[in-house]
Image (cartoon, rainbow, N blue to C red):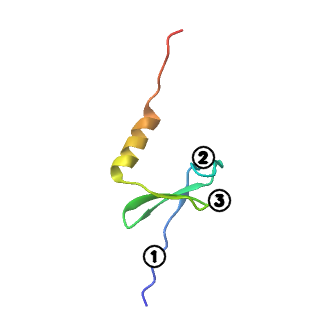
Amino acid sequence: MTQKPSVKKQFIAGARCPKCNELDVLVFYREEENPVRECVECGYLEVLSEQTEKEQQNAAQLINIKEL
């Protein structure tokens, strides 16, 4: 019987779970090269596509500045 290698999971600081809305409970890891977000509190699980991951990174960099 072959044992599956350990998966390195990292917490996403400041992120809220889209299901239970708790803060700092999401972990990020890769499963078979697919990026995954998982909530350690409620069990929410989302497998992201590479395109979704890039869109989220780009969205995090956008800052709107309004003139006063």
Q: Is residue 56 left or right of residue 44?
A: left
Which residue is at a point 56% across and 48% down the rendered structure image?
A: 18
Which residue is at a point 37% across and 45% down the rendered structure image?
A: 54
Q: Are marks 1 and 3 in contact (CB under 8 Å)?
A: no
Which residue is at a point 43% across and 91% down the rendered structure image?
A: 1
Quadrant position of the C terminus in the picture: top right
Residue under numbered circle 1: 5
Disc 2 crowd, CA 10 A, few/some/many (<14, 14-19, 20+) = some
Amino acid type of the residue that numbered disc 2 sits on in the rendered structure: Arg
Sequence-wise, which precedes: disc 2 or disc 1?
1
Mark 1, secondary structure of its residue = loop
Residue 45 screen position, x and y as percent? 51, 60
Residue 59 screen position, x and y as percent? 43, 36
Residue 33 screen position, x and y as percent? 36, 63
Sequence-wise, which precedes: disc 3 or disc 2?
2
Residue under numbered circle 3: 41
Which residue is at a point 38% across and 61% down the rendered structure image?
A: 34
Label drawn at residue 16: 2
Mark 3, secondary structure of its residue = loop
